[in-house]
Image (tube, helix red, strand yellow):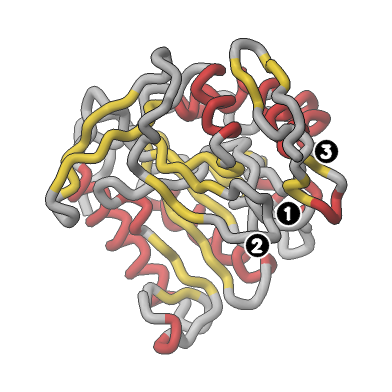
């Protein structure tokens, strides 16, 4: 028997009592209410960006799947954009983020995490941020060590980076960019930086795509900068136990001793009210240096 829907703003949340995090006592409605309350914080990161849906319609104990194509039954006021997908031989209609209605519609579709491109739909080939995904095989401590080394490397190149928890066991390092360099150039720059890191710290950093071939604990992934690739923005919830939130950090908080799971649905709003380390991000756009 399904539970009657609950209206949240202008969106009906269907099956609101469905347990999304059973062990934590959190339902689909809890997720929707969280996003509704923090919409003012997350929406600037989703505005005018194509969204890839990570749908977990039965919660974290069941399977999740990625979906790029917008469902056919979207509300009329939820915008979409048609983007060519050469590998699929067709165009894909993506949902475009930026409004509270769109955000809650995504939640109602079962999206726990939001995934956005590093460019806006008006200039898809001109990224306005550069991203590094630090994915450790042995826990958060290694990711923290690499993030601090990566910060030094980027500062040596004249760039000021920003850091956040991924919502998992890793970290994301972003650099805000002036729109100008095309996607291929941004990815090439990120690859060059990652290559330098792996050469200088071979026991800690790898750029090897194949897991079986990796000989260092932290995979420095730059493919979030490839065309049509996505990454979770600040304040996105993730589908892991305890409902963790991808949280912006001050650099002095990045430590091997930090437990990223302390930032979750139950604690995030208190943290967001106390600190806003990325408040200067969009006002601090930088020009990509030459490699």
- Identified at 76% across, 40% down, the residue is 1
Pointer 1 with pointer 3, Cβ within 8 A: no
- Identified at 35% across, 68% down, the residue is 196
Point out the residue furthest to the front here.
1
Could you tell me which secondary element the residue under label 1 belongs to? helix
* Front residue of 233 and 289: 233
User: Spatial distance from mark 2 to mark 3, Cα to Cα?
Assistant: 17 Å
Which of the two marks, 1 or 3, is nearer to us in this view?
A: 3
Could you tell me which secondary element the residue under label 2 belongs to? loop
User: Spatial distance from mark 1 to mark 2, Cα to Cα?
Assistant: 7 Å
Above or below — where is 169 with respect to 22?
Answer: below
To which quarter of the image does residue 148 belong? bottom right
Quick check: can you spot residue 283? no
Relative to 121, 162 lies left or right: right
Query: Looking at the image, is mark 1 or mark 2 earlier in the sequence?
Result: 2
User: Spatial distance from mark 1 to mark 3, Cα to Cα?
Assistant: 12 Å
Query: Looking at the image, is mark 1 or mark 3 earlier in the sequence?
Result: 1
Residue holding disc 3? 267
Residue holding disc 1? 260
Count how many numbered circles sit on residues in the image.
3
- Identified at 40% across, 88% down, the residue is 213
- The spot of residue 115 in percent (x, y) is 47, 42
Disc ID at residue 28: none
Residue holding disc 2? 169
Mark 1, residues whose alpha carbon is within 10 Å: few (<14), some, or many (≥20)? Answer: many
Mark 3, residues whose alpha carbon is within 10 Å: few (<14), some, or many (≥20)? Answer: few
């Amino acid at each position: 028997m399904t539970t009657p829907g609950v209206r949240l703003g202008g969106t009906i949340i269907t099956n609101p009592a469905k347990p999304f995090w059973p062990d934590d006592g959190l339902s689909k409605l809890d997720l929707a209410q969280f996003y509704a309350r923090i919409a003012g914080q997350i929406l600037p990161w989703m505005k005018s960006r194509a969204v890839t849906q990570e749908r977990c319609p039965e919660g974290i104990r069941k399977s999740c799947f990625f979906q790029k194509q917008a469902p056919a039954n979207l509300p009329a006021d939820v915008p979409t954009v048609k983007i060519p997908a050469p590998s699929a031989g067709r165009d894909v209609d993506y949902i475009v983020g930026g409004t509270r209605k769109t955000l809650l519609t995504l939640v109602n579709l079962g999206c726990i995490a939001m995934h956005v491109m590093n460019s806006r739909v008006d200039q898809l080939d001109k990224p306005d941020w550069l991203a590094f995904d630090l994915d450790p095989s042995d826990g958060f401590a290694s990711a923290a060590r690499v993030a601090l080394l990566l910060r030094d490397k980027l500062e040596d190149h004249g760039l000021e980076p920003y850091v956040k928890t991924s919502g998992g066991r890793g970290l994301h390092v972003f650099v805000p960019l002036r729109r100008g360099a095309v996607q291929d150039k941004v990815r090439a720059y990120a690859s060059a930086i990652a290559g330098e890191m792996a050469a200088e710290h071979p026991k800690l950093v790898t750029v090897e795509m194949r897991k079986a071939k990796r000989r260092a604990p932290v995979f420095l992934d730059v493919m979030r900068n490839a065309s049509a690739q996505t990454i979770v923005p600040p304040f996105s919830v993730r589908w892991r136990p305890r409902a963790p939130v991808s949280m912006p950090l001050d650099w002095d908080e990045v430590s091997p001793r930090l437990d990223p799971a302390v930032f979750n649905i139950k604690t995030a709003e208190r943290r967001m009210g106390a600190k806003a380390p990325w408040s200067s991000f969009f006002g601090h756009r930088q020009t990509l240096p030459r490699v």
